[in-house]
Image (spheres, rainbow, N blue to C red):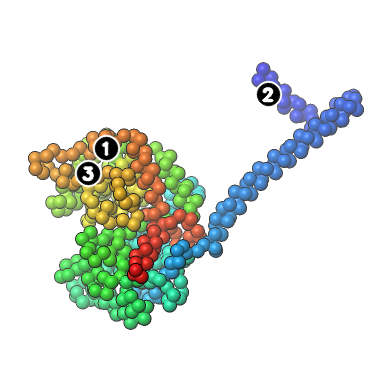
């Protein structure tokens, strides 16, 4: 019966709109012709109304996103915060980029400083809504990205007299990495010392002796805490700098002056709008995760680092539930962002062993991929990024396994089996943890410097809000 109805419908439509329509109906009575005319008019009216409603719906959606993209023109800074960005002499920031091939003794930084520090665009097979938001961003370039974001930030003021916070856009990380092999210790510190002299000559510094000032460093604090002839310079040992708030990708957990604050390492994703962020979050929520856990990394030298890394690599390689992506000589896949995100987005848990220092960029890559991080040191995140990760129960978004439990012969204890520990976590708990991790994405992501309107607070917004709270305490 259904088939008969479907076959009959086309014939009726064809007859209705055929050239001989008038001839076919010429034998009908006037009343029937009138009724037919009414039916045709009603059908036509219904079609027009339906089209109008659909078009209106599309128009409303277009207007919605049009208003979102235009909202930057009316976006305001919340809470009365105002940040003055120092116009430093070029030698302290952009002037350093002229010799970009020598900004790092290990790497040519020229490809990484383009696009205001975002690096080279990369193609990633994702929805077109986020296709232009991916870059091969270097892990030690946060100082450039932060500067670029601040230049267009709604909280920026051009009036230093009424400013509440003062941002010093010094590219200290790039300066330090260009002189790691410099034998002359005075030369290593030269630019940092000149910066302090410059700041102290400004009336805005004298107001609170730098306590309302902050700077951002793209390298770990250890690169600026040299007290002898070893690695790095002495920027963070200078008393005037210790009056400031210093934002760095890794702080000294034993900083007694509380002037160092951890900020996220940059990832590869730099959205323009909240819609792009939400699109990516939804993609990660729907991602299939066949691997229980994964590890991306290379062995490390040194007894402590080697012991943990070697055990993770061993356990992962022996487990059918673990995906291992090796790094180091002969293993180049981990240098490609797409490969890294592919492994993480297909994993439920991502092992985050300390790298050359306590922290690693991979932590933020795992958050970006919606992969629950597994930590082996409290200093990888818990003592570092209090502004960005939830306070309180860290088990809401992570798993912690003490690295001492992975070392053979530690008091006669058996080595913890990571797979068994992760399998103990109930499925519902895993889902809640992943949801928390995915919700953290905006807070640990650096929006594109040209973002018209993000709508969700990114890492720069979160840092500014925390600095503002700290600044308000100066008046109490």
Percent of width and height locating residue 161: 43, 77
Of the image marks 1 and 2, the number of the one nearer the N terminus:
2
In the image, 424 versus 82, the foreground residue is 82
Q: Are marks 1 and 3 in contact (CB under 8 Å)?
A: no
Percent of width and height locating residue 263: 33, 59
Q: Quadrant of the C terminus?
A: bottom left
Q: Residue at x 24, y 37 (%)?
A: 421
Residue depth check, mark 1 versus mark 2: number of the one nearer the observer:
1
Q: Residue at x 40, y 48 (%)?
A: 439
Q: Which mark is residue 6?
A: 2
Q: Quadrant of the N terminus?
A: top right
Of the image marks 3 and 2, the number of the one nearer the N terminus:
2
Q: Are marks 3 and 2 in contact (CB under 8 Å)?
A: no
Q: Which mark is residue 422?
A: 1
Disc 2 crowd, CA 10 A, few/some/many (<14, 14-19, 20+) = few
Disc 1 crowd, CA 10 A, few/some/many (<14, 14-19, 20+) = some
Q: Residue at x 16, y 46 (%)?
A: 404
Percent of width and height locating residue 415: 15, 39
Q: Quadrant of residue 57?
A: top right
* 82 relative to 431, above or below: below
Q: Residue at x 43, y 51 (%)?
A: 123
Residue 333 vs residue 7: left or right? left
Q: Quadrant of residue 118?
A: bottom left
Disc 3 crowd, CA 10 A, few/some/many (<14, 14-19, 20+) = some
Give the residue number, with chain letter if any, for mark 3.
401
Residue 103 vs residue 357: left or right? right
Among all residues in the image, which is located at the extreme front?
Answer: 476
Residue 67 vs residue 194: left or right? right
* Residues at marks 1 and 2, CA–CA distance in whole angstroms: 56 Å
Q: Which mark is residue 404?
A: none
């Amino acid at each position: 019966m259904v088939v008969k109805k479907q076959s009959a419908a086309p014939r009726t439509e064809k007859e209705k709109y055929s050239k001989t329509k008038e001839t076919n109906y010429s034998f009908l009575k006037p009343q029937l012709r009138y009724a037919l005319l009414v039916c045709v008019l009603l059908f036509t009216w219904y079609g027009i109304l339906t089209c109008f409603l659909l078009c209106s719906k599309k128009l409303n959606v277009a207007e919605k996103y049009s208003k979102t993209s235009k909202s930057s023109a009316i976006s305001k800074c919340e809470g009365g915060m105002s940040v003055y960005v120092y116009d430093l002499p070029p030698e302290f920031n952009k002037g350093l980029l002229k010799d970009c091939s020598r900004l790092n003794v290990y790497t040519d930084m020229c490809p990484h400083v383009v696009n205001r520090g975002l690096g080279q665009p990369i193609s990633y097979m994702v929805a077109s809504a986020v296709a232009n938001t991916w870059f091969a961003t270097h892990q030690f370039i946060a100082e450039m990205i932060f500067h670029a974001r601040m230049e267009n930030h709604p909280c920026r003021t051009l009036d230093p007299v009424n400013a509440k916070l003062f941002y010093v856009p010094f590219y200290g990380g790039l300066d330090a990495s260009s002189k790691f092999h410099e034998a002359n210790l005075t030369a290593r510190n030269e630019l940092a010392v000149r910066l302090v002299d410059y700041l102290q000559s400004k009336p805005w510094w004298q107001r609170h002796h730098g306590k309302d000032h902050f700077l951002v460093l793209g390298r770990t604090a250890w690169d600026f805490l040299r007290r002898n002839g070893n690695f790095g310079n002495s920027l963070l040992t200078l008393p005037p700098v210790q009056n400031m708030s210093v934002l760095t990708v890794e702080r000294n957990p034993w900083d007694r002056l509380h002037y160092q604050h951890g900020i996220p390492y940059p990832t590869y994703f730099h959205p323009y709008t909240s819609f792009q962020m939400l699109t990516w979050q939804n993609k990660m929520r729907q991602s299939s995760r066949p691997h229980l856990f994964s590890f991306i990394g290379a062995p490390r030298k040194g007894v402590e680092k080697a012991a943990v890394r070697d055990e993770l690599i061993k356990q992962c390689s022996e487990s059918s539930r673990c995906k291992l992506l090796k790094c180091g000589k002969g293993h180049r896949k981990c240098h490609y962002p797409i490969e890294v995100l592919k492994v993480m987005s297909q994993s439920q848990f991502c092992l985050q062993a300390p790298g050359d220092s306590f922290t690693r960029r991979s932590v933020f890559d795992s958050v970006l991929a919606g992969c629950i991080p597994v930590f082996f040191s409290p200093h990888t995140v818990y003592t570092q990024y209090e502004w960005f990760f939830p306070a309180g129960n860290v088990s809401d978004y992570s798993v912690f396994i003490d690295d001492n439990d992975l070392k053979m012969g530690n008091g006669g204890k058996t080595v913890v089996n990571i797979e068994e520990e992760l399998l103990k976590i109930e499925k519902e708990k895993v889902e809640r943890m992943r949801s928390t991790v995915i919700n953290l994405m905006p807070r640990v992501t650096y929006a594109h410097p040209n973002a018209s309107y993000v709508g969700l607070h990114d890492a720069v917004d979160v840092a500014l809000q925390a600095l503002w709270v700290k600044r308000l305490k100066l008046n109490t």
